[in-house]
Amino acid sequence: MFNSTHDTRDRYAVIGAGPSGLAAARNLQKLGLPFTGFETYSDVGGLWNIANPRSTVYESAHLISSKRMTEFAEFPMADSVADYPSHRELCGYFAAFADRFGLRAHYRFNTRVLQVEPVGEGAAPLWRVRWSEGGGGEAREALFKGVIIANGTLAEPNMPRFEGRFEGELLHTSAYKSAALFEDKRVLVVGAGNSGCDIAVDAVHRARKVDISVRRGYYFVPKYVFGKPADTVGGLKLPPWLKQKIDSVILQWFTGDPVRFGFPRPDYKMYESHPVVNSLILHHLGHGDIGVKADIARFEGKTVYFKDGSQDDYDLVLAATGYKLHYPFIARELLNWQGMAPQLYLNIFAPRFDNLAVMGMIEASGIGWQGRYEQAELIARAFKASGSDKGAQFAARKAGPAPDLTGGFKYLKLERMAYYVHKDTYRAAVRAASAELA
């Protein structure tokens, strides 16, 4: 049992010290709500700290959104930071954020949360948190007033099952760190999302051959437009159908038609899936450095058979097939898990409880860390208002019909899109809920 000199039942537990966890900690701090943070690794930064064993970034990893569209508003990145910062710059940024607001002192590092469960009935029970320290020490536990889950969405690999047996190396991109892995190998990258395209570009400079296997078409967005980061250009508010039409035409002016390089034509409209933000993948395709292959049918030895009837031999197959939501320490029903993801109010609040929240379970084009900071601000205000008239009104809204966060876009029914939102619609909804609780 946890031996403490103080009672934790007036404190909130924050699980994770990555960007979302730090945002949660900062906003609890601002409202004077006591909390204890739990972090498996020895320092802050989450996946952006490449030394963290749970980190899935690689040596060449950079943001795909620009710094000014991504940073915390109350803590801007220095002018000296690159437009698209590397993981090294970002790790330093989060360390500086934690130092600026004295957040490290609130965390128990080298501590793995084992279980989170409610104790008692009603919408605001106490929560028992069990954890172990130092890589498997004796389990301890304590009761907390509420819990914020912020352990990230990009740590648990989504590894597909392939027919047959591959006798070369078969890895998920979560295991990829350095382009040295590709030295003199025939490489097949499976999946052309942002990580897949980044890693295929890395492989070009070391591998004997690089191909990329895809099952659907993609929209490719350059990182710079008219010499400026692409996400800082434009911004006109248009109906979804018109924005899709105009932006897809403008995009072809800058990138051309990826179909000519062998990609399938997208069977969905722009913005209905996350675009690929990469200025180099089409460059290398155009130079013949990367080949496009169809979806995989099966493996046999080192031969990969594709669904279009073609085949080729490889030494390494690297699955860039994304990640699964992973909250192993809490029962799924407590998070109202339905289908591919928890169904939470504003992607944050568990319907049954007023003191259980999830940070960072959102994906959107350009949502940035400020979008997550606004989530944290709403959580802190909701927790602060618990038991008041405002808190009761918020709880009633939370129990009502879920707001439409799609912005009118029809997102693909994929696991990675199960918690996708439209940035402007989502941030407006979170800000409005937060303002009512202020």
Image (cartoon, rainbow, N blue to C red):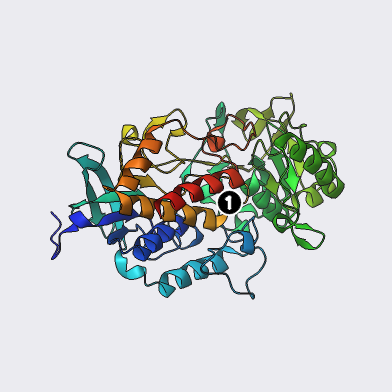
Q: Quadrant of residue 98?
A: bottom left
Q: Which residue lies under the disc numbered 1? A: 367
Q: Residue at x 22, y 37 (%)?
A: 122
Q: Position of residue 27 (x, y in %)?
A: 40, 61
95 left or right of 423 in image = left
Q: Residue at x 27, y 60 (%)?
A: 134
Q: Residue at x 45, y 34 (%)?
A: 341
Q: Quadrant of residue 88?
A: bottom right
User: Nearest the camera: 290 or 215?
Assistant: 215
Q: Position of residue 67 (x, y in %)?
A: 62, 63
193 left or right of 435 in image = right
Where 167 falls versus 23 (above or below)? Answer: above
| Quadrant the N terminus occupies | bottom left
| Quadrant the C terminus occupies | bottom left
Helix, strand or loop status at disc 1: loop
Q: Position of residue 170 (x, y in %)?
A: 55, 41
User: Nearest the camera: 397 or 35?
Assistant: 397
Residue 328 in sight in this render: no
